Image: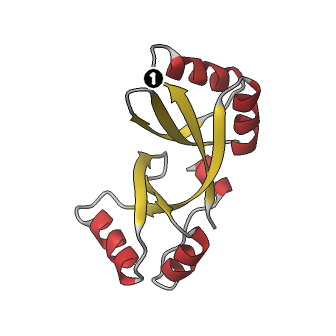
Amino acid sequence: MSIKQISIFLENKPGMLKRMTDVLASHDINIRALSLADTKDFGIVRMLVNDVYVATNILKEENFIASLTPVLAYEISDKAGDLNRLLDKFAAVNVNIEYMYAFAGKKGAYMIFRVADTKKAEAALNGQGLKSLTQDEIADV
């Protein structure tokens, strides 16, 4: 099952990231994973949180531009070549990865993937023996 990632557009100026994390912290939102990509004028924060719908609503109430994007999450072991083995399965079913990032949780390491069609990719990857994490599992890993 795909999970929901929050994407936030931030003006590229001092204090904007801190302002966003202040809002989340003040509402007990736990950031599980975060990626930040920037350009000269703005940045895109992509993150997984413990309560995606509450976090998105709070951010919008505080005038942040936030949207939800479906992504796939898979656990990987801390062994040389494990990411390569995971990517072999993507290649075997011809799934193109738009972007990816990783995070370490209490129970292991996890890779987050954005693909064009999450449902189609997930079905194909299930056929390769992969099970993606659910929204509830992400909050607890």
Q: Which residue is mark 1?
A: 12
Which of 137/59 is in front? 59
User: Which residue is located at x 24 percent, y 66 percent?
Assistant: 81
Q: Amino acid at mark 1?
A: Asn
Compared with 5, 129 (above or below) is: below
The x and y percentages for residue 13 are 45, 17
| Residue at the extreme top of the image, as rendered | 14
- The picture quadrant where one finds residue 137 is bottom right
The x and y percentages for residue 44 are 49, 37
Compared with 66, 68 (above or below) is: below
User: Which residue is located at x 65 percent, y 48 percent?
Assistant: 68
Which of 80/84 is in front? 84
Q: Residues within 10 Å of mark 1 (few under 14, many from 20)?
A: some
| Residue at the extreme bottom of the image, as rendered | 127
Query: What quarter of the picture does the N terminus occupy?
Result: bottom right
| Residue at the extreme left of the image, as rendered | 80
Element type where label 1 sits in the image: loop
The x and y percentages for residue 136 are 68, 54
User: Which residue is located at x 31 percent, y 57 percent?
Assistant: 78
The x and y percentages for residue 104 are 42, 46
Tell me how many marks there are: 1
